[in-house]
Amino acid sequence: MKPTDFTLAGAKAALDERAISSVELTKAFVDAIEALNPRLNAYITTTPELALEQAKKADERIAAGTAGPLEGLPIAIKDLFATKGVKTTAASKILGNFVPPYESTVTSNLLRDGAVFLGKANLDEFAMGSSNGTSAFGGVENPWKRAGEPDTKLVPGGSSGGSAAAVAARLALGATATDTGGSIRQPAAFCGIAGIKPTYGRCSRWGVVAYASSLDQAGPVARTVEDCALLLGSMAGFDPKDSTSADMAVPDFAAAVVRGVKGLRIGIPKEYRIDGMPAEIEALWQTGMAMLKEAGATLVDISLPHTKYALPTYYIVAPAEASSNLARYDGVRYGLRVAEKDSDLNDLYERTRAAGFGSEVQRRIMIGTYVLSAGYYDAYYVKAQQVRALIKRDFDQAWAHCDAILTPATPSAAFAEGENADDPIAMYLNDVFTVTANLAGIPGLSVPAGLDKQGLPLGLQVLGKPFDEETVFAVGGAIERAANFTAVPSVRG
Ligand code: GLN
């Protein structure tokens, strides 16, 4: 077995037993990245020297018996997390040369626990997108291929497409990601790996480039549910620097993965059976239900009546918050500055923002500014906030009948590059099963559960009560054991 084939938990055990050193493990990933990243474009920036230096220190701590929980394990960092001294672009030209003088809380936590950083993973610009196609640094190729179509490039999903592709292609043991409307769960599903968006407030947002602050949440992607649990255990935790961070203890997530589902009530929301849902997605969902029943859970039909308003609500709230968050990129304080000799302040703003933001980001800023403007504020923004409260209430009421909810993760498998590219609405439909969790602030996990008839991975989604990631992990673990998903992508390091 190649070192890059280890799961994160497997590599951790191998390091513990001194079967491999962190330097050897890290070197294997550095070599794999060097060979494959020019093709996949999963990383915007790689930091091999830094990684090997961190690995050397990790080996010293392992030898000294002072290893942290993630000691010596090489991972990728979505290029939305500020990393001190390492370029952090948000996949935007406007931050193309930005080198933060500080470290985000989540990445600080990972460093504290001994993780090794291989580099910064590609994403949709400012995390806006579902295909990684809006990155100013080019798209990412999904390492999976449709059977018999080795030349068709598929997208890895988005916005955390680089994170998911890197993990699937064995260019990292795991990766950080963020999810505002599905950006952890959809790319995880498209790339045949696991990913969890924790409860809003579980991970600090401090040092994460903001997209839509009331929806943004950091979380991990990794090959297995257990690996996600290990990473989240380090990423999570109270942070006084983020006023929305929850002051709650971090449970032993990894222990929850093997807890089983006996006696759990699993809600099946009828509103997720959407018009035009492909038969394969419906079949996968049925398989998931059967697996959980077999493992001892009870299935309960539930209703989340406001589900149909989730997508339009999200696409008002998220751009509104984005338009306000992105106002800071003005060419004055940091990042790109474009001005002519005789530019006044407005001209500086206009030139900088026109040159620095890509078209999807500009579209979101325009939508956001429109829904927040006098005259439309009540009709759109206030209305969307009211509907958001109803969507959250649907879930609050559902928890009287069930302990977790099972749905498909995405309405399709990975699509080809260019597909949906000139139809923003078709692109937005990708998020139909995932945005509700962000609007309600609840945790959601995507777990690979099967292949479609073209050989592409499909994921199931488990939703849980606020701050009950443990039950979500228990259900995800049960699906993972039953599905026994062993397929591998054709392109890998
Ligand atoms: N695809 C969604 C969007 O474009 C979600 C992105 C995300 O979760 N960051 O907004």
Image (spheres, rainbow, N blue to C red):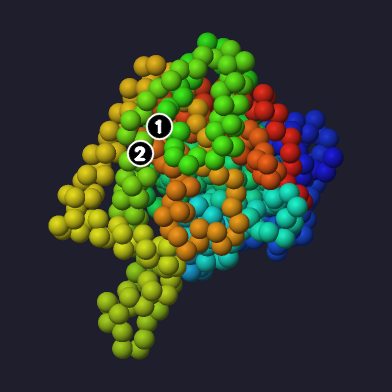
Q: Earlier in the sequence, mark 1 or mark 2?
A: 1
Label 1 to label 2, Cα distance in Å? 7 Å
| SS state under label 1 | helix
Name which residue type carries label 2. Lys
Q: Could you tell me if the residues under marks 1 and 2 are in contact, i.e. CB atoms within 8 Å? A: yes
Instruction: Report the number of numbered marks.
Output: 2
Above or below, comparing residue 377 to residue 333 in the picture = above
Residue 287 seen in render: yes
Q: Could you say which disc has been placed on residue 293 in the image?
A: none
Residue occupied by mark 1: 271
User: Up-down: is 241 above or below 150?
Assistant: above
Badge 2 marks a residue whose secondary structure is: helix
Observer able to see residue 204: no
77 or 301: nearer the viewer: 301
Is the residue marked 1 within 8 Å of ligand 1, measured from its CB?
no
Q: Camera-side residue: 182 or 344?
A: 182
Q: In the image, residue 365 lies at what x, y percent? A: 33, 61
Where residue 168 sits in the image (x, y, percent)?
A: 68, 46
Residue at position x 34%, y 69% in the image: 330
Residue 131, image x, y percentages:
54, 55
489 vs 191, left or right, is: right
Decide: is 319 above or below 244. below
For this orientation, the residue located farthest to the top is: 263
Residue at 38% across, 74% down: 354
Label 1: how many residues lie within 10 Å, few (<14), some (14-19) or many (20+)? Answer: some
Residue found farthest to the bottom: 341
Q: Is 32 positioned to the left or the right of 81 in the image?
A: right
Q: Which residue is mark 2?
A: 308
The picture places residue 402, in percent across and down from the top left corner, at 43, 18
> 125 or 129, which is in the foreground?
129
Residue at the spot x=41%, y=36% of the render? Answer: 437
Q: Residue at x 62, y 21 (%)?
A: 291
